[in-house]
Amino acid sequence: MILHNLISDHMVLQREKPIYIFGMGAGHIAVTFLGKTYEMTNYGGDFCLTLPPQPAGGPYEMQVDLDGEARTITDIMIGEVFLAGGQSNMQMKLSEVVPPRDGIADYPMVRYYNTQRPERGERLGASWTVAAKELAPAMSALGWMFATKWAALRDVAVGIVTAYQGAANLQSFVERDVLMATPMGQHFSDHHAVSQRIYPAWGEDGALYDFMIKRLAPYSMRAVLWYQGESNNSFEEATFFPQLMKLFVENFRKTFRDPTLPFVQVQIAPFGSGCAALGLIREAQMIASDITPGLATVTIGDIGEEAQIHPSHKEEIADRLVRAVRHTVFGETEIPYLGPMVHTVTYEGGTARITFTHTEGGLVTDGEIDNLYLLDEAGNKHLATCRLEGETLVATAPIERAVGAELGMEVFSTMHLFNGEGLPAVQFKR
């Protein structure tokens, strides 16, 4: 019998959720943990022994007997586990981004499980690693920053389990049979995305689900932190992305035996050399949140880099992920995580008056708003000049009659409109 690599020294178990001890092989397994013994006999294939939920604590030991082979697993913590997944922006290492404000230090309460991926190049193996200073540069920058912030905030052990692969489309993370059971999936299987042709090792439908996702299940976790979407970059894909994201979330929850597992996704950043549909993909990510219960989205329209698809300021994203988890997962609704969202737009001649929700602390700018356009009756876009009147944005363009407005929908622009909490406005098209 073989235990999964996740069940090993330094692991973090999710508090207050079932503890799954799993692996493969026939025989009898006995697990002794916190003074109680749990047993089962497996007659072949995979096995999974369920232990009851436990409060935060540690370090603990666990005795495991696999059909007569005894071992002791040490330095076990019970705390919060988060999966950090997606493509290259989640894959970026701490050594590749702007260093964290407080520097890099040892964080014994943070542990990192680095799932191997099809593309080689990971320094850390598929085992739990304590976040020591000398190893931190090889860890996901966003995963490390989020985990260290959360550990400091809650004084609890944090485990980060990775599941990322650069240049990966979302279809690859969905179980192929589930994808193909939908007309949407069948259509796009016949019309292969660019990444499927260029990256056959991980671009095919369901490839990363098989290579990563299902192999981690059913390890219990608090939430999934997801940063992906740059590889779903066609106009056609933008139309189905919300439904695909919903399918991905539902498939993931079923695989991990957690029907309400929360997800927090990062909206992809504006990028100057991106495809023409990039703004629509960002919009599709927001729509996905609207149609998928338990899926929240944080926006980063203010930190995109015109010449770089990988924003180097990951700490700002980590801060917003912490806010989103506090608000949506832990019910701390007094902690806002979204910036101003369009509420009403009224037109008078060439002027639009725009009101917003999520304006905690009022509307503020950090410069000229240069990414708001008004549309004339022919559908042509005209750059507007903007001013704030309290919590109303007044936009004017040199046209006779405005009939539409859009903010931040270009392939690249920088958001200069915020609420008083420093959170950027959410792009819109009306």
Image (cartoon, helix red, strand yellow):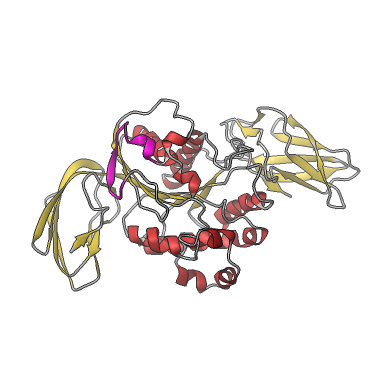
| Residue at (37, 49) in percent of width and height | 222
| Residue at (15, 46) in percent of width and height | 61
Horizontal arrangement in the rendering, residue 76 relative to residue 32 (left or right): right
Which image quadrant: the N terminus?
bottom left
* Residue 127 covered by magenta stretch: yes
| Residue at (56, 31) in percent of width and height | 421
- 172 in relation to 142, above or below: below
- Identify the residue at the far top of this view: 102
88 or 13, nearer to the observer: 88
359 or 26, nearer to the observer: 26
| Residue at (48, 42) in percent of width and height | 324
The picture places residue 47, in percent across and down from the top left corner, at 23, 66
The picture places residue 275, in percent across and down from the top left corner, at 66, 51
**Quadrant in the picture for residue 195:** bottom right
**Residue 217 in sight here:** no
- Identify the residue at the far left of this view: 68
Q: Which residues are magenta?
A: 125-139
- 347 in relation to 103, above or below: below
Horizontal arrangement in the rendering, residue 340 relative to residue 264 (left or right): right
